[in-house]
Amino acid sequence: MLEAASQAPPGERERKIEQCEAILKAYRRAGGSRVPAMGGAQERHEGKEESVKEGEEILEEIGLEKPQIPRVTFEDVAGLEDVKREILAKLIYPMRFRELSREYNVQFGGGMLLYGPPGTGKTFIAKAIANEANARFISVNPSALYSQWFGMFEKNITKLFRAAQLLAPSIIFFDEIDAIVPKREKSGSDAARRGVAQLLNEVGGIGSQKNRDIFILAATNNPWEIDEAMLRPGRFDIKIFVPPPDREARKKIFQLNLSKVKHLGPVDYDLLSAASEGYSGADIEFICKKAAQEAFLRAVKNGSPKPVETQDLLDVMRSIKPSIDSRLLERYKAYST
């Protein structure tokens, strides 16, 4: 159907693409984790199952968790509308509508770097991207990588990308990429430098025919600490700044985190969002949990439930320093220009 949409006349093309989008969304809502393969040949299905099993076994060998298609969607990401639009335009749509993207010479390959202050939801967004792309999410963090790959860095990087091929469509997500691929003068031992060189080589091969269903995502709080070779064209072609939540996004984050509190009194979300300038999404999540915990302890002490109210949240907020300051934001601004 996507191919037919790409071949339709201009006026009809937009309508068919909208139909494709609606089908994809309906399929996911119905519980489907992946768009079914066309044709449905039994041998193909069994072959894919064997490939998936082999890929999972390779990841287990190198100490990584079994990958899944995350349940998180873009609808779950509070605010960040500009970020979501950019990701849809530069990654999701070219992946979904391959034939149409080729007609416009819009290509995707290499990787995408998400950078910004701590606690702004970079990992959450990465999971939402995997969901939107119907891709298995292979999460790689520095501690697992180095503890499991000591002395075998190069070999296991090759294994990682082999597993991603077997599990395709897949997304490899490197959290804290600056700790994995630091600037050359900070890269430590010769073994680490050889491993970095191998990783650069593998990432550079993404987008080739054999790796056409693999994409690389990475997140960092410190983009200026990454080896410049990793940021060259053909590797991380797309760099997206994930800013702190704006006022409307902060309001949604408060609402989301308090939605499961049964004993909730009147809450002035507009006041809370205005008072929380400089707080990250993670900060706000902690404030909500702390306020609920304090209200719970009072209920235990008094023998009767007391609702969480606006003042409870403001009291906790006053005791917690915001994690994002203007100097840090200026540094990100300077990096992105």
Image (spheres, helix red, strand yellow):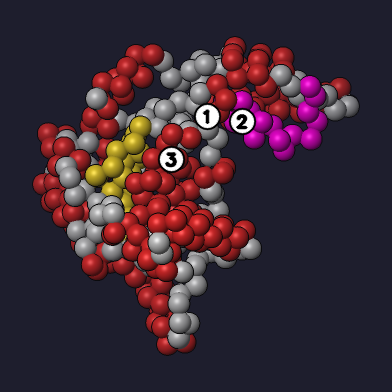
In the rendered image of this protein, does residue 173 appear above or below residue 42? above
- Between discs 1 and 2, the one toward the N terminus: 2
Residue under numbered circle 2:
252
Q: Which residue is mark 3?
A: 85
* Residue under label 1: 281
User: For the residue marked with disc 3, what is the amino acid?
Assistant: Arg
Q: Is residue 165 left or right of residue 282?
A: left
Q: Is residue 45 above or below residue 62?
A: below
Residue 205 image point, x, y percent: 19, 58
- Mark 1 or 2, closer to the camera: 2
Crowd band around label 1 with a 10 angstrom C-alpha radius: few (<14), some (14–19), many (20+) = many
Q: Residue 293, image x and y in percent?
A: 70, 28
- Is residue 252 inside the magenta stretch? yes
Label 2 or label 3, whichever lies nearer to me, is: 3
The reply to whether the C-beta atoms of the residues labelled 1 and 2 are less than 8 Å apart is no
Place residue 185 in its image quadrant. Answer: top left
User: Given the image, on which type of amino acid does mark 1 rest?
Assistant: Gly
Part of the protein shown in magenta? 250-266
Q: In terms of secondary structure, where does tag 3 sit? A: helix
Q: Label 2's element?
A: helix
Q: Is residue 29 above or below residue 55?
A: above
**Amino acid type, callout 2:** Lys
The answer to whether 48 is drawn above or below residue 157 in the figure is: below
User: Tag 1's secondary structure?
Assistant: helix
Left or right side of 194 for 2 = right
Quadrant containing the C terminus in the rendered view: top left
Residue at left offset 26%, top offset 64%: 211
* Residue nearest the viewer, comparing 252 with 52: 252
Select label 3 or label 1 by which is in front. 3
**Residue drawn at (24%, 58%), measured in percent from left and top?**
206
Observer-nearest of 212 and 281? 212
